[in-house]
């Protein structure tokens, strides 16, 4: 078995693990740690006027490269420049994030940074667009998160050693623009890659038996959820309060921002006066976006309901397809009696299932309040791959703690659960519908996982072929000792 597991890791390293490493490193490029030191603009777009030495922005002169000191240019990909210091920063970022950097080398990181810039360079050549609104929206969300973490914009600037908000935004804009171009180019390369059932079968058949992957113990879990009924009088109290706030702002010039700080129950925006910047692509619930984009600048909405409670929205500024808004969220109070009723109802449902009046799946379809799972008999879907199985070693800790002591066909007692998204609490009962012990991959039982591995390998091949073709057609220069690197791609064209 030890030999088999070792071979499994070797097999996965050429497909899934390498793919995940590529994606992880790309994400790390825009981690918040990376902003601690300034990244020169030539890394993103060669500026019209150089920020450091003039040699940095000249990408077609071998003579000028020789005038750069060793801590200068590491490589040039098309119009993009990579500095030696950028490689060191990325390595520091990985360490700051707690990632193991034992197997990450200077050459490996340089190769990854070169890949990112080749994607971005070709995206521009192929007229793949990333709008300024998209980039600004992403940057705004990141800044909002940073402000929430450290307390104020002034502390963010101090932490990242930036003299002004404008300088910080500009650098963040450039970093995000490159990343988004790179991601869109990669998606274009693999977007149409599919695998047929025959390709999956051939993929599995080619794996030697002693190298087939071992899948860990897995569970299939179903649940029935009951949400407490909120009394109409409690809902009306919230609507009346929001209408009172709206009238005070409109009639008495009260500050919407101050009202949000005082009354909003949205933890993500309360401290910022209810502020969000959003586009139609921002992952807010449909009801919220529909109301926001129906308002004019300076207008305040009437109270409206989402799964999170009741809101009012004030549109502060409209910039094309991007909105700066403030909102106030207030949730109706749920009396203990309503929670008790939900728990009693679940107790009754559980009792009837144990008495075999109906199955767990039938009860979920008829009684569960969770629309995402009820039509599937309460079956939970793994958010990673939407499969119905959850590998124990990768399961969300909260869910694992709820099911770890359940035996087969046993139904849990009602469990009170807070909505992680900020909505009202609910009760649920859980049932383990299937249990799979650790086992060597079986084509029939593990088809979805094998299909995923086959797809990843085919996508990896598509990326590799694309790289080989475009490295040949793109200006690439690797400087100094970096030419001695054993790159995965043919960056040193000789």
Image: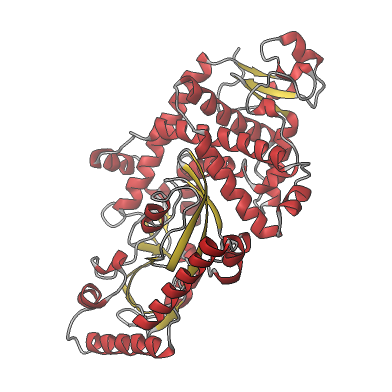
Residue at position x 47%, y 70% from top?
242
Q: Against 402, is 248 above or below?
A: above
Instruction: Say whether residue 72 is visible.
Output: yes
Q: Quadrant of residue 309?
A: bottom left
Q: Nearer the viewer, residue 216 or 40?
A: 40
Q: Nearer the viewer, residue 314 or 1?
A: 314
Scheme of image coloration: secondary structure
Q: Against 178, is 214 above or below?
A: below
Q: Against 351, is 437 above or below?
A: above
Q: Nearer the viewer, residue 254 or 40?
A: 254
* Rendering coords of residue 52 (x, y %): 79, 24
* Rendering coords of residue 320 (x, y %): 47, 38
* Rendering coords of residue 360 (x, y %): 24, 78
Residue at position x 43%, y 74% from top?
240
Compared across the picture, whether 94 is left or right of 225 comes to: right
Q: Nearer the viewer, residue 35 or 115?
A: 35
């Amino acid at each position: 078995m030890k030999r088999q597991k070792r071979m499994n890791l070797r097999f996965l390293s050429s497909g899934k693990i390498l793919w995940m490493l590529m994606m992880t490193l790309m994400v790390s490029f825009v981690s918040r740690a990376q902003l601690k030191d300034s990244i020169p603009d030539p890394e993103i777009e060669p500026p019209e006027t150089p920020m450091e030495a003039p040699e940095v922005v000249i990408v077609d002169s071998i003579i000028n490269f020789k005038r750069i000191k060793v801590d200068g240019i590491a490589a040039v990909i098309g119009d993009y420049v990579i500095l030696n210091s950028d490689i060191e920063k990325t390595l520091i970022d990985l360490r700051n994030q707690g990632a193991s950097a034992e197997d990450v080398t200077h050459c490996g990181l340089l190769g990854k940074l070169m890949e990112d810039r080749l994607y971005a360079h070709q995206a521009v050549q192929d007229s793949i667009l990333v709008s300024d609104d998209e980039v600004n929206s992403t940057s705004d969300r990141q800044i909002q998160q940073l402000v929430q973490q450290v307390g104020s914009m002034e502390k963010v600037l101090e932490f990242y050693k930036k003299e002004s908000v404008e300088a910080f935004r500009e650098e963040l804009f450039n970093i995000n623009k490159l990343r988004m171009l790179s991601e869109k180019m990669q998606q274009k390369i693999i977007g149409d890659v599919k695998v047929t059932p025959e390709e999956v079968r051939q993929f599995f058949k080619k794996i030697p038996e002693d190298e087939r992957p071992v899948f860990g113990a897995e569970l299939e879990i179903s649940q029935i959820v009951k949400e407490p009924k909120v009394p109409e009088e409690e809902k009306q109290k919230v609507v009346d309060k929001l209408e009172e706030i709206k009238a005070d702002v409109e009639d008495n010039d009260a500050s919407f921002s101050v009202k949000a700080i005082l009354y909003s129950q949205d933890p993500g925006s309360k401290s910022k006066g209810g502020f969000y910047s959003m586009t139609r692509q921002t992952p807010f619930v449909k009801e919220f976006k529909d109301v926001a984009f129906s308002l004019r600048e300076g207008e305040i909405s009437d109270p409206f309901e989402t799964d999170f409670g009741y809101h009012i929205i004030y549109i502060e500024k409209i910039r094309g397809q991007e909105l700066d808004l403030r909102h106030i969220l207030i949730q109706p109070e749920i009396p203990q009696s309503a929670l008790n009723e939900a728990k009693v109802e679940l107790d009754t449902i559980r009792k009837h299932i144990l008495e075999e009046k109906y199955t767990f799946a039938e009860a979920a379809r008829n009684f569960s309040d969770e629309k995402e799972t009820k039509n599937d008999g309460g079956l939970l879907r793994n958010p990673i791959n939407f499969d119905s199985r959850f590998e124990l070693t990768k399961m969300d800790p909260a869910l694992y703690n709820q099911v770890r002591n359940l035996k087969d066909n046993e139904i849990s007692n009602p469990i009170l659960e807070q909505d992680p998204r900020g909505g009202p609490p609910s009760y649920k009962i859980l049932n383990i519908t299937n249990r799979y012990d650790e086992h060597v991959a079986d084509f029939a039982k593990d088809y979805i996982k094998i299909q995923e591995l086959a797809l990843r390998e085919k996508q990896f091949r598509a990326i590799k072929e694309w790289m080989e073709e475009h490295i040949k057609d793109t200006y690439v220069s690797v400087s100094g000792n970096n030419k001695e690197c054993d790159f995965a791609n043919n960056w040193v064209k000789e």
